[in-house]
Image (spheres, helix red, strand yellow):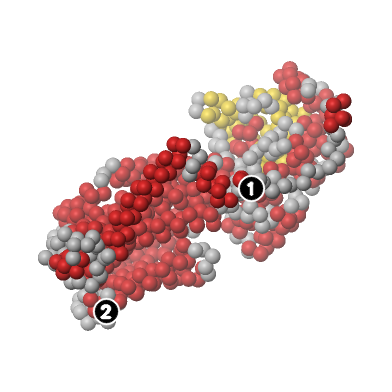
Amino acid sequence: MSDIHANSVAFVRKTEIPPAPPPYAATGPVKWLRENLFATPANSLLTIAALYVIWLILSGALPWIANGIWTTSSLTECRQALDGVAGACFSVLTERWNQLLFGFQYPSEFYWRPTLALVLLFVAAAPVLFFDLPRKLLVFTAVYPFIAFWLIWGGTILTPILALAGVIAGALVYQRLVTGSFAYGFFGGIIAAFIVWTVGGWIIPAGASDSAMLTAVPSRDLGGFMLNMMLGVTCVTLSVPIGIALALGRQSSMPLIKMICVVFIEFIRGVPLITLLFVASVMLAYFFPPESTLDLFLRVVIMITMFSSAYIAEVIRGGLAALPKGQYEAADSLGLDYPQAMRLIILPQALKISIPGIVNIAVGLFKDTTLVSVIGMFDIVGMIRGPILASTEWNGVYWELLGFASVLFFIVCYGISQYSQWLERRLATDHR
Amino acid sequence: MAEAATQMKVSDEIAITITKMNKWYGSFHVLRDIDLVVNRGERIVICGPSGSGKSTLIRCINALEEHQQGSIEVDGTLLSSDLKNIDKIRSEVGMCFQHFNLFPHLTILENCTLAPIWVRKTPKKEAEETAMHFLEKVKIPDQANKYPGQLSGGQQQRVAIARSLCMRPRIMLFDEPTSALDPEMIKEVLDTMIELAEEGMTMLCVTHEMGFARQVANRVIFMDAGQIVEQNEPEAFFNNPQSPRTQLFLSQILGH
């Protein structure tokens, strides 16, 4: 072939070159080490320095954890048991386990109720999170909030049933009226729900909660990590739909709706959450008549939901803006009306783009629920800073308690993050 | 080729009437005094330099763009700001875009069945049968369960045509359907459009494919600066253009 080549530039390949394996030094762990850890002298130095720092941390932390004491009933006993050896007093966790999880006022004989509510939460969330599951499970998801409310707060079962009846009445009226116009359906549904709730409120006898199947537990008795979970789950579930509505409202061609949404979002984003929480705990009372006591838990939920829905609205607005205009035009040109175009074409794509942002806010919101400790609610941080650290037995046990709180939050947040990554992979249809 | 065009019959029934239509983008007068009557079964090719308003014109017909003056009547329905009228017209008028605009989160089949199911309230099974029928017609039934991102440009554009056909439109609008395609794929899309024309579909097509215009159109409209400059039957239009602007345009696009 080469002599042909020497004579002319024309060239025709007659035989195929068979593929061959790469040379030994270019594969396997040796190659990986050389490329990633010891590529240059500076790189090698950094690797060694990093290894030294890792060793320093682990050599301090691992014995401290391994020497940990789990069975004493106060810090002094724990110190005696350790006898000068560096070690953790994990016994504060075992001794105050229930307080950390449920707060110090929730009746201990009813701990099974929030626990059951948590287990049912997974069942209720499953069909929403994993849409390959049968759609019929969503019925349980729909009634779960009322079951959970009844389990945690107890009292007469008529209250959650009435709340459910109001929601069903609202939904029925909405379905009936929405064919005329979305606004009729929306406001008609809300009015119907309020009528049912008000009328039902008169019907439920005053003392119904005293002789209830589940003893009533007031909101101020809720506490511990349970309170964080309740606030986190409630606020995230409420703020996603509200955020979507705000994002769509901000894009609306109706000036009034657009203005309301813009003002709401900009105002809420411009105010620190802690301010809103103080407003919830102190100020709101001034605005309501003295005899109406809106539950503190409810006030906090409203404030956190408003806060995070404003952020979620902005994230979703980003997703909406990222969609090519052609998608709106294609939906329009097929004759889909606005709600159909949004629900079937625009939102599925915009939300998919917004998943990382929404999850970011959900994780942040979940951790921000610890701020309620500042307004005198005994969530897990409130419990640690208040009743546990202030007690004579455990005064001064910071690392173990705050470390435990961090671990709990980390487990939940890491779970959310892993789920979101799975969801992104699952929804990827663009095959880039 | 010319015989093929004459064989296709044009009825006397009127499909679209545009009278004294004007449109502005802000203060820019983009469409000026457009008068156009399209009969049922007519195949009209609209050409002209970029920015001449040809896309805007056909986008006004299904109200993707709003016009400010004059009237547009499609299939006897007057295009007004009433949303019910607009949705009715849009469901009767199919449209294909330059960039296909398939819905990337839905499969090919779902792309085709979505509008019939939600707008026409067709049962899912029936909608799927219709969709498969039209996918066979555009010769890609085997891709039905793939996503748009897995298809080539030409295939995507044919899916877009099938998606519009699933609504059983009486009029089809094409907005530069081959401009974003490789030369190899242009033919497969044009073949589909020719087939559609032969079945008597009323078509308005913005395109630079002059071969297609000669073969299929029974009227060619040349637009410049927001006005209809010249319209004629393809033979006369290409062989004997009257306006100097048309002559210049044709010499430039046919010259190379």
The x and y percentages for residue B250 are 76, 23
Specify whether B237 is left or right of B119: right
Residue B146 vertical placement versus B216 (above, below): below
Q: Residue furthest top?
A: B244
Residue A214's disc number: 2
Q: Is residue A398 visible?
A: yes
Q: Nearer the viewer, residue A364 or A7?
A: A7
Report the Cα–Cα distance between label 2 and label 1: 71 Å
Total marks placed: 2
Q: Residue furthest left?
A: A392
**In the picture, which quadrant includes the N terminus of chain B?**
top right
The x and y percentages for residue A161 are 33, 74
Q: Nearer the viewer, residue B253 or A17?
A: A17
Label 2 vs label 1, nearer the camera:
1
Of the residues shown, which amino acid type is indicated by label 2? Leu
Q: Nearer the viewer, residue A406 or B206?
A: A406
Displayed quadrant of residue A318: top left
Mark earlier in primary sequence (2, 1): 1
Residue under numbered circle 1: A24
The x and y percentages for residue B94 are 66, 46
Residue B16 vertical placement versus B138 (above, below): above
How dense is the environment of label 2, judged by Cα within 10 Å: few (below 14), some, or many (20 and up)?
Answer: some
Q: Is residue A301 visible?
A: no
**Does the residue at mark 2 contact the one at mark 1 (Cβ under 8 Å)?**
no
